[in-house]
Amino acid sequence: QVQLVESGGGVVQPGGSLRLSCAASGSIFSIHAMAWHRQAPGKERELVARISAGGSTNYVDSVKGRFTISIDNAYLQMNSLKPEDTAVYYCNAEITTRARIRLAFWGQGTQVTVSS
């Protein structure tokens, strides 16, 4: 099928930066969009950033001006990190498989911890 492999999480001090990446592989015909979601303890999963194949982006208000998503490996550049950014970050891809079926796929998640 399709696999999404995330990397780049870790522990960083407030004000620091991290870059997440998500490599998609497998039975892929085309990628329509890629996105990052996050889930903090006790909270619902939320969309953080999304980019379409055409390059259109959207961000949750709390990260605008600090996070940037790019289509290549769905890089998520996270700057000026705050403790409230602490969460497990999940990559999501909207893909048409080689069988011409459009599906959404999820990665396993990567932990981001912002703490002094």
Image (spheres, rainbow, N blue to C red):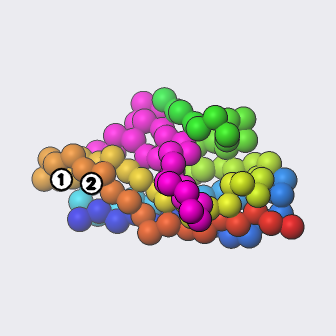
Look at 49% across and 54% down and name the residue there. 45
Q: Quadrant of residue 17?
A: bottom right
Q: Is residue 48 above or below residue 89?
A: above
Look at 68% across and 70% down and name the residue there. 10
Q: Are marks 2 and 1 in contact (CB under 8 Å)?
A: yes
Look at 38% across and 50% down and name the residue there. 93
Helix or strand or loop: what does disc 1 sit on?
loop
- Residue sitting nearer the eye, 60 or 96: 60
Residue 81 is situated, as x and y percent measured from the top left of the image, at 76, 52
Residue 1 is situated, as x and y percent measured from the top left of the image, at 23, 65
- Residue on which disc 2 sits: 28
- Residue sitting nearer the eye, 96 or 43: 43
Amino acid, disc 1: Arg
- Residue on which disc 1 sits: 98
Q: Is residue 6 above or below residue 61?
A: below
Residue 4 is situated, as x and y percent measured from the top left of the image, at 40, 63
Mark 2 or mark 1: name the one nearer the start of the chain: 2
In magenta segment, residue 52: yes
- Residue sitting nearer the eye, 67 or 21: 67
Task: Say left or right for 62 vs 83.
Answer: left
Amino acid, disc 2: Ile
Look at 40% across and 36% down and name the residue there. 53
- Checking the image for residue 24, the label placed there is none
Please give the range of residues in magenta: 29-55
How busy is the neighbourhood of tag 1: few (under 14 within 10 Å), some, or many (20 plus)? few
- Residue 48 visible in image: yes
